[in-house]
Image (cartoon, rainbow, N blue to C red):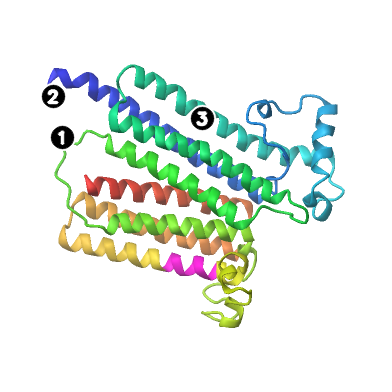
Amino acid sequence: MPLARVPQTRSLSAVRTWIYTLAALVVLMVAVGGATRLTGSGLSITEWRPVTGAIPPLTEQAWLVEFDKYRQISQYELVNKGMTLSEFKFIYAWEWGHRQLGRLLGLVFFLPLVWFWVRGAIQGRLALTLLGIGALGGLQGAIGWIMVASGLEPGMTAVAPIKLALHLTVASIILACLVWVAAGLKDRTDAIPEVRAGYAPRILMGLILFQIALGGLVAGSKAGLTYNTWPLMDGALVPPASALFSVSPWIENLVDNVVLVQFNHRLAAYAIVAFALWHAWTLRRVAPGSEAARRASAMAGLTLAQMVLGIVTLLLVVPLWAGLAHQVFAMAVLAMAVVHARVSAA
């Protein structure tokens, strides 16, 4: 390696490590967000205070004030009536922790960004790309509050499923963008030329993102708490049309009908596993022993494992550990799919 290239290579290595750190924080954010949802904690903080909200209640009087605000919303009246202050502190801690992680993520993004930019390690197209990801992160914070606000409406006991799905999908897109950029910064000057895998890796990546969005609808509508059998749903492989489209107008079934919401999630899982297996078989046949074939085989294994985990989660009626594992593992599958698509396109 020429000496003139060493500083730039080291700088890009540091930038890549920073971006992967951001990706790990996004996954942690998704995990804590999932725990917040599964413990019913998401509506415990009824205000959006991006700056002053970083400080939790520090006195008993401050806690009582926050608790009184929570007791004004429908979730308390219809679901948690009679909750004690200590029980409120538990759900408050999950939501506060989720928001704190968002603030931490913002600092870990912008402070190193300025540092690398001033030192010239980030410039041009890379700088614009990272600024775009930062803007998407800011938008995600606003989407998070819009989601919470939907659950604070009179009569609502949880956030709107479509807004929860949007919040999870945008988080997944941010993760995908970070991993895509980081994977593209690796120096492959001396690497063995990659086998061209066509559009299949990108299609697989897109399918996984779509499935995560469907999973967000399942989570938001609590569809995983119904039809806890597999492979049949209420004794049928395919539920009758009268059950799948019982809501009028029919378009609302895609969001509000737990039968169709869960069925769509199942169908997408089958499609992804089948596509991943076909993709791995194709590459192992045309390029046996190649890195691309090994990555495709790993993707097939990961998608199959995620489907099995999803089935276990359903059969157990979504215990906290299984629901979290299924959500976090989805992020791992997505990240691997992005790396595969990015490297295959290099």
Q: Position of residue 54 (x, y in %)?
A: 65, 27
Instruction: State whether the magenta stretch is mostly helix, strand or loop.
Output: helix
Q: Which one is nearer the viewer's eye here, 122 or 298?
A: 122
* Residue depicted at 59% across the width and 51% down the height: 321
Q: Which residue is mark 1?
A: 189
Specify which label sits upstream in the sequence, 1 or 2.
2
Q: Which one is nearer the viewer's eye here, 134 or 13?
A: 134
Which amino acid type corresponds to the residue marked 1 in the rendered image? Thr
Q: Position of residue 51 (x, y in %)?
A: 64, 26
Labelled disc at residue 218 = none
Residue 84 on the magenta segment: no
Q: Is residue 120 left or right of residue 188?
A: right
> Which is more foreground, mark 3 or mark 1?
3
Which amino acid type corresponds to the residue marked 2 in the rendered image? Met
Which amino acid type corresponds to the residue marked 3 in the rendered image? Gly
Q: Which one is nearer the viewer's eye here, 93 or 308?
A: 93
Q: Position of residue 218 (x, y in %)?
A: 58, 61
Q: Secondary structure at mark 1?
A: loop
Q: Which residue is mark 2?
A: 1
Q: Quadrant of the N terminus?
A: top left
Q: Which residue is mark 3?
A: 106
Determine which quarter of the picture holds residue 242: bottom right
